[in-house]
Amino acid sequence: MAEPVAAMCDQLIKAVNVMMDGESSQRYRLEALKFCEEFKEKCPFCVPCGLQLADKSQSPIVRHFGLQILEHVVKFRWNSMPPQEKYQLKNCAMGLLSNGTHPIMEEESHIKDVLSRIIVEMIKREWPQHWPDMLTELEALTALGEGQTELVMLILLRVAEDVVTFQTLPTQRRKDIQQTLTQNMDSIFSFLLTILQANVDEYRRLKRIPSQELKAKAHCRVGVATLNTLAGYIDWVALIHITHDNCRLLEMLCLLLGESGLQLEAAECLLIAVSRKGRLEDRKPLMLLFDDVAMHYILSAAQSADGATMAAKLPGQESGDVVVGVVVVVERDYTFLKRLCQVLCALGTQLCTLVGSTAEVEVPGNLHKFMEAFLAFTTHPSQFLRSSTQMTWGTLFRHEILSKDPVIVKMTMKYLRATMHNLVKTGFPSKNDSPSCEYSRVDFDNNEDFNSFFNSFRAQQGEVVRNACKIIPLEAFQIAGEGLQYQINMPIDVGTTMSKTAEGLCSVLSPSAVQWDAMTFFSESVVGQLFKTLDKEKLPVDQGIELLQAVLNYDTRDPLILSCILTNVSSLFPFITHRPHFLPQVLYKLFGSITFEVIEESKAPRTRSVKNVRRHACSSIIKMCRDYPKFILPCFDMLYTHVKKLFSNELLLTQMEKCALMEALVLISNQFKDYGKQKVFLEELMAPVCLRWQSEDTSRVLWDPVPFLAHVGADQTSIDPIAEDMTGINRSRISFCVYTILGVVKRARWPANVDEATAGGFVVGHTPAGGPVLRNPCTTQVLALLPNLLALIRTHNNLFLPENMARLSETFTRAYEVMDVEKNLVLGLPQPVLDIYDSPVYKTTLERMQGFFCTLYDNCFHILGNAGPSLQQDFYTIDGLADKIVNSALVNLDNVPDHRLRPMLHILPAILCPRVFIKQLVVSCPQEYYESLLCPLLRPLFTYMLQRLNQRWQVINQKGTLCSDDDEVCEEKQVTQEMLEEELVRLVTREVMDLISVACVLKKAPESAGNKEEMEEEEMMATESSQAAPGTPTYPTDELTELGKCLLQHEDIYMTLLTISFNSLSWRDTGNCQRMASLVVGGSLVPEAVTWFYSSVLKGLQMHGQHEGCCAALMQLAYLIYDALVRPPQRYAELRAVMAQIPNIQVEALNIYDQKTINPPPQKLGERKRKDHFKRLLAGTVGKPVGQQFKKEVHIRNLPSLFRKVKPEAKRDVLENSENAVLASLFAPLQEDA
């Protein structure tokens, strides 16, 4: 046998060398790989070959392959090997551990890894039942040297990972091994701590001796391996093992924080230990880390690491260090600093959990030391370290007891002052203007990554500042006021990156711009919370007015600074309610900003910052009029006069700015509380719009696609400046009309108080329940404009007809495509790089046309969406409303692209579905109009969407399963377009599911009307026009809405809804699948329908079973359907035929399950056992990820359990048992007494 083994080994060595040789051709490499794989699968003497190749005399590559052969044998042949061969292989493997490796500092890490894997695979199959002395043998190995000790640590770590962390074993084997580990945990921990202590002591002794440096490194390597192994156990063992012997383990870890070679691993162990959850009583000993000695070691380590993190650049600097000028960030020391920061954060969280709890933990006496250390991390140059502390600061400030502690109160002041500086956006990786830049180059790949991180970091700080303001509101306001005054008095510093628009203006990264931005955000957070925290009489009104005056008097022509000024004016505005005579100054400042220009009479397009200033001013006015309409009412005439003056120059304001001012006036007019007066005002305000919208020329354009395209200039080939100006004005006027209608419909309302509404003439009757029927003063105007609006929607849909698409000129062939901004949002691509220099925003004629069509279509549906809540019964009683909407919004949907369908589907829930359970103000449709309006509208919509989505997903599913050779080479644009189309189908699908959910199912957590209004406000004033991404889906409850009950009365609608829902389970959209899997089938169904619905669930399992969340939801749905429809009285036998088609299903197991379902035994099985049984039946249909589909399965046999529970015999008198005679004798009279 020796000769064939030797010959085979020679061939294997050649094959391995060919595979690993970079000069080998692909053909030879593949042939060598095939030879090696066939050898592992078929050769009868794998073990002797593997042992020979694993010999120390071979090269590392060959040795690794030899050990891989042995691992393959253990994983795939172990079950068929005779016991004697198993025993021999185990002894050979232990021999390799003993003397089959080079010294610890010379051996390759991948050799150690594969050798430890072989032993672990044996342990998983044989321990403890057939290898009871395994732990003793491993302990004996540690006496042979550092190399063997490190291997033992690797083995123990991998056992913990496979059994507990990753759970890669069958349930029974996992339980046996884990319970045995738990039983032996005292000895395991004692063993690990002994090894750690011994090697640390040797390391400390030998590192002082120059000639023993290599030996010292060997002991350090063992110490690192032991700490890594401890980290694998600390996460899950009982806390008593961590805190045993007066927290000896924690004490050792704290001491090791000062050892440079071991400190990182020690910090990671310490972090896992102090982050543990569990019983509060068990966690009490962790408070020992607040002791002076432990805190001293932690703080000393932090100080030394902070000093070592920044080091002078030396010759031969390691490649892991990031060089910055003449200094470097030492990455290992910086990582250690991050771990220490996380340790302090975890300690703070434990403190907040234990103080004030049933554990009765007192506030530590040296809390000030901890807080000073924590503050040091918050003020560290690293932006990452600063952000890591924010969550713990917030927890401390919210804590009922700690937030009142004098130490925390004092520290709150320091935190607020530190945050003013932390909010300044500095530290871009590409720059060198701050110490933060060096750390950012380690933490972030580019400026975009840093910018994204800093935006979320700033939001975190804002939340914590608001919590801090609750503790010391007046002091926080004083700090904000001082910071704002300082900023006002500072001269403008434009820095090196000046704006290119005009001389002396800031760019977004200029020192003054980032400082103003930070200070504005800070003051806004503080002032906003101040009014929520303090009573009116305690507000610092005088100081607030003084600060507001300073802000109003600050004059600047820099748009970035002016935008910050406007934010401060808005945040300080509530103080004006206590000093009304300052209101004109505020309005003067805001109206001056609405028409702001950097260069007057400039022909160049406005820069983004100038546009934002103007929109900011408009938004501020709307916000004031929305939140303080009564207060601003006396100035209404002055405002109206000024607005008319601005409107007299058509080119002075954009259409959106005009609409914003009109919305502000409408909001104030709601305070007239006089129906007649408000109606007259709205008629006057909307007169120009009504005149233009209802004119014969406009109607002709809106009702026919051909003149519409000519009117807006989409059919023009040559770009004539004069013609472009004219068609641009036409587009602008149409947009203004739609914007105005939308603004009036959104804002015009009746008084909230019923008595005031009655007195003002808004009440026109009462409902059968006794509630008032209200009328809106804008009803007459809006209803008159509605026919042309519906015509515009129909015309827009008809623009996609082939004959109308052909009318588009070559310049505008892409006018209906997705805008680039929206495309990036849909695909999740990062937005374009920040425009540092704020150049003028030049838009091409195509971009302007795209923006016009997109915004116009969206706004038309927004008007319909708001018409219901605004006009109420006047809208829903329109004669033939359902037909009118169907004949406009649902016309020619076959040609309408998916990105145009989204707005309609997104807004339909708001327009159609009843939400009486949220707020009376957002009731969209009275119940009496369900049959006449909603059913005729939803029937064709759902029917069409079912057909459309089925077609779309069929194509996508086929793409996922079929792969052609021609697909290998594709242009990037083509790939991006396919991804975009697929993602749009996914979004449209979710919009349809949202519509079904809102229409039929009561939601658990409805959004508040106030938040919704603010969200719409921000959306209206958004800098770029785009559609919001869909939010996280909310899972429906079992309760149907009244509309849902109504829809289910119509069998065709009911079946369409069910078909959409169950079809969606097998579409390639895991999020949608998981959501819709919560449906429960009820009612009586024909057998064919039952079979189809159940098959749909199984198809969903086949498609999405690889995803844990989807698999659980689909399993539950399948269980509920089968359980409900198999047991009497339903008894659908067809389901059994479906079950029989599942691959590898055991018919006997299915028969047993059915028998127990139809005829439950007297002693009922537990629900969990029944579900587990059912889950095993469906195992063959659960889909696997592609990477697992062709993977060879590893089978680990169960061994006789060591921990089987003995069940007591049921209903048997213990006194009847002879073994319990002693118990009976205890109650018998003594012989002497007798």
Image (cartoon, grey):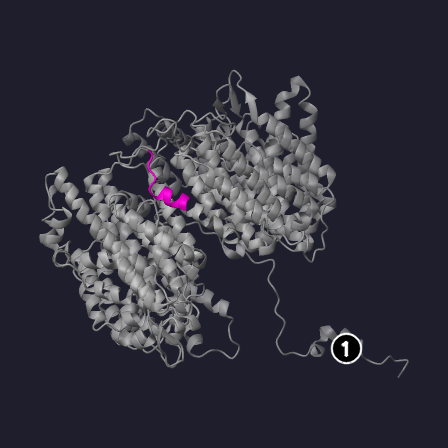
User: Is residue 168 at all visible to an observer of this figure?
Assistant: no
Which residue is nearer to you in this view: 845 or 85?
845
Q: Is residue 589 magenta?
A: yes
Instruction: Please state the horizontal and vertical placement of residue 1194, each as a whole percent of the image.
Output: 44, 49
Circle 1: residue type: Ala
Circle 1 SS class: helix
- Of 988 and 721, nearer the camera is 721
Per the rendered image, the range of residues in magenta is: 588-598
- Report the residue marked by disc 1: 1224
- Where is residue 1132? Give x, y as percent: 33, 76
Q: Is residue 211 above or below residue 854?
A: above
Disc 1 crowd rating (10 Å Cα; few below 14, some 14-19, many 20+) is few
Q: Is residue 440 left or right of residue 15?
A: right
Residue 874, percent from left and from top:
28, 71
Residue at (45% x, 43% y) in the render: 73
Question: Which is nearer the eye, 363 or 1073?
Answer: 363
Q: Is residue 505 above or below residue 350?
A: above
